[in-house]
Each structure stands twice: as C-alpha cells, then as structure tokens.
Image (spheres, grey):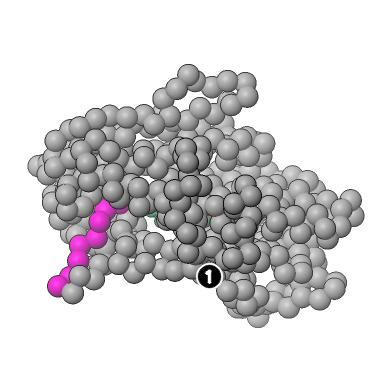
Amino acid sequence: MTDVLIVGAGPTGLTLACDIARRGVAVRIIDKSPAHHRESRGKTLHPRSLEILEDLGVAHRIVAGGTTHQVFRKYFDGAHVSDIDPFAGDGPTPDAPFDSAVFIGQWRIEEILRHRLSEFGVQVELGTEMAGFTQDAEGVTAMLTDGRTVKATYLVGCDGGHSAVRGTLGVPFEGRTEDMQSMVCGDVEAEGLDRDFWHQRFTPAGAIMLWPVPGTRSFQLQASPERDEFGEPMPPTLDGFQRLFDRHAKVAGVRLRNATWRSTWRVNVRMVEQSRLGRVFLAGDAAHVHPIAGGLGMNTGIQDAYNLGWKLALALTHQAGSALLDTYEEERLPIAAWTLQLTTERLEHVLAAIKEPGNGTEVTLTTAVPQGYRRICSPPRAVPPRWQVRIRAV
Ligand SMILES: Cc1cc2nc3c(=O)[nH]c(=O)nc-3n(C[C@H](O)[C@H](O)[C@H](O)COP(=O)(O)OP(=O)(O)OC[C@H]3O[C@@H](n4cnc5c(N)ncnc54)[C@H](O)[C@@H]3O)c2cc1C
C-alpha cells in the first residue's frame, strides 16, 4: 500500500511526485513508456512555474540548462524584419526573481525533475501501464496491464490528453477538436542555421519556425502542414520538413537532417467538469487541453500539481479533511477554463497578426491578461457551463 499513486511521469506527474515525496509521504509514479523520451515538446517555462520549481529546488538547474531572454528573429517573405526579446525589461527584483521565461526542451525539464525525485528515493516505474482501478472508503486499487495491482490511499491521473484515468472515471472531456487547424512539429538538425535565435519565418501562405534546443544540435520545428489534393494535412516527414523550409524560409543552403521526432499537433480545446471523484484526481493535460499559443499547457499542469501536492500531504497526515481536497477542483478548474479561453483568443490573435510583417509569436507571450480581455473574449464554447460563472468572477 502506498499513500499516493501517480499515473504518468510527464511534467505534471513529476512535479507532483517531487512535492509529495519531499513532504515524507509515500508515493509511487508509473509510466507506460518503456523509456524516457527525448522530444522537445513544451519549451517555455514561465516565471510563475519557475517560482514553483525553485521551491522544489530545481530552478537553478533549469535556468542553467535553458535559454533566458530568447530572441525571436522574424522574417516575412524571406526578408528579415525584426529581432525581439519579449521578456526584455528592468531585470529581476526581489519580488520577481525570474524576469524571463526559460526556453528548454521538455525532455530536459523531465530529466531534472526525475533527478530531484531520485534524491527523495523515488524512481519512475517505466513500462508500467495502468489499465483501470476501483475505489472504496479505504483506498484505490489500480490494475496494471501486466496483471499486477497497486493499492493506494489516493490516485492522481497525470496521464495526458488521452487519460485512461479520466476514461475509467467516466468523466467527459468536453470541447472540440479542430481537424483542419493543425501544425507539424519535430526535432531536426539544420546545418547552416544560426543557433542564437528562434527563427520565425512567415509568408502569406504559412509559416515555419525553428527554435534551437539547448544542449543539443537540434531545432524544434513547427510549421503549417503540407496538404494533399483534398486539403487534408499530410503526415510529417523529413523531406516534407525540407519542402516547408524552402517554401516559407526562402533561404538557400540550409539542409535539414536527422529528424529525431516528427508529429502532427491538432488544436484541441477540451476540459473536464470534475477533477476529483472520491480518492481520484485529474491533473495537467488529463484535465484540460488547449492551443499552445503562449505556451501554457505544461505550465498549467505544473501549477495544478503544486496546488494538489500539499493538500494531499495534509490529508494523509490527518491535518486536513476532505474539504481541503475539494478546494483543488474549486481553485484549478476556473484556471483551466480561463486558460482555454485565453489560448483560443491568442491563437486567433496570432494567426491574424502574423499576416502583417513584423509580428511573431511574441503577441501571445504576456503573463498579464490583456487590457479589456473579459470584454473582448468570445463566448467560451468549450468551457462547461458550471465553470463559466467562475471565470466571470475572477
Ligand atoms: C510542439 C509543442 C509545443 C509545446 N509548447 C509548450 C510550451 O511552450 N509551454 C507549455 O507549457 N506547454 C507546451 N506544450 C504542451 C505540453 O507539452 C503539454 O501540456 C505537457 O506535456 C502536459 O504534461 P502532462 O504531464 O500533463 O502530460 P504528458 O506530458 O502527456 O505526460 C503524460 C504521461 O502519462 C503516461 N501515460 C499515459 N497513459 C498512461 C497509463 N495508462 N499508464 C501509465 N502511464 C501513462 C505517458 O506515457 C506520458 O509520459 C507543447 C506541446 C507541443 C506538442
């Protein structure tokens, strides 16, 4: 029997595991993957998340392994338009020690969190897939696909957008998927491309962006997909990446090679209406997914975990009861709903803005709510009615 079983060792599950383990609570963390991935995926850690990671004792390693004050270099139709550091300002202050987001590959963030977790004596159990669970007044019994069972007082599903924990709970994932609004992404080497900049190259027909992943020879590539004769997005290939580069970057002599990750990302705007059912919780992408505009997915998951960790620890040491655990959902689902709205709004904003020379993804990167946001935001189509009221009250 363990106190907490965490299903999923992405950034959300690892943050939660570190927070629980450092409080002396017994935790197990399982992941169905046979090996740790090396994909850049979420690359922007915002100052609020860095404050959490500082409290967990890893911010210095994250900052050392990433890039602060990343310069966005923009081109329109092949012509250099501008260089912008969206976090340029007056520098850190005692109240706000992190004056810039850190740009760092998600695999590296996870590696640093796993290392921290091992300092508390906990290892991720790889190749360990949860198939389902039951719960009663005493605890939760999780069934693994290899036939074993794990008993825990609480179970937390940090198992991503296709969450099996959410599926077992029968909690709907309300919202929508935009099949036509998609991008291809991947990690690829780009010989001849300057590694000091996040290259954002726009044309009236689309875009390609290449961000240098620190500590590697790779760039994270994001681009409008190639489309077939029916207008459907085509699957990502290295040859396709090169064609997209040639079409939108309009620069000769840069060869892309060694694509270690290739993926298609579709716009999903979905969230749950409940993130606690009895002894089981949902956090991170398992509870909410939304456009990556502004880079908030991983950040929101890390902040979910930080909200839940200390509450579980107090409940497990009989210093708090069920009412405290209820505040996780009460506090985090309105944030999820707000994030769905904000990122949808910002995606529309950036897609319109980049048609004009000089604009890039920095139009999505502000930690503040834009002036008049509540007034201009469109009706929250994907947000369950129960949480819409809360958003207006924020
Ligand atoms: C190109 C791209 C760029 C992005 N940029 C950003 C960004 O700049 N900033 C940002 O904040 N976010 C960004 N994101 C989003 C970010 O990657 C996700 O929001 C983040 O990975 C969610 O973390 P998570 O831990 O909740 O889930 P995941 O990272 O999906 O982890 C879930 C884990 O659960 C495991 N699992 C699943 N099912 C089971 C099971 N049944 N049993 C055991 N284990 C299981 C999986 O193997 C996986 O390891 C980006 C994503 C992409 C694709």
**Amino acid identity at mark 1:** Glu
Query: Does the stretch in magenta take in 223?
Result: yes
Q: Nearer the viewer, residue 280 or 356?
A: 356
Q: How many marks?
A: 1
Q: Position of residue 203 (x, y in %)?
A: 17, 47
Residue for point 27% across, 38% down: 359
Place residue 81 in its image quadrant: top left
Residue for point 78% across, 46% down: 23
Chain part drawn in magenta: 221-229
Q: Is 235 positioned to the left or the right of 65 in the image? A: left
Point out the residue furthest to the front here: 375
Q: Position of residue 54 (x, y in %)?
A: 62, 35
- Residue at the disc numbered 1: 174
Indicate whether 43 appears above or below 320.
Answer: above
Q: Nearer the viewer, residue 2 or 160?
A: 160
Q: Is 288 positioned to the left or the right of 292 in the image? A: right
Q: Position of residue 237 (x, y in %)?
A: 24, 62
Q: Is residue 254 visible?
A: no
Q: Is 339 positioned to the left or the right of 251 in the image? A: right
Q: Nearer the viewer, residue 362 or 344?
A: 344
Indicate whether 295 appears above or below 234.
Answer: above
Q: Is residue 373 visible?
A: yes
Indicate whether 374 appears above or below 64.
Answer: below
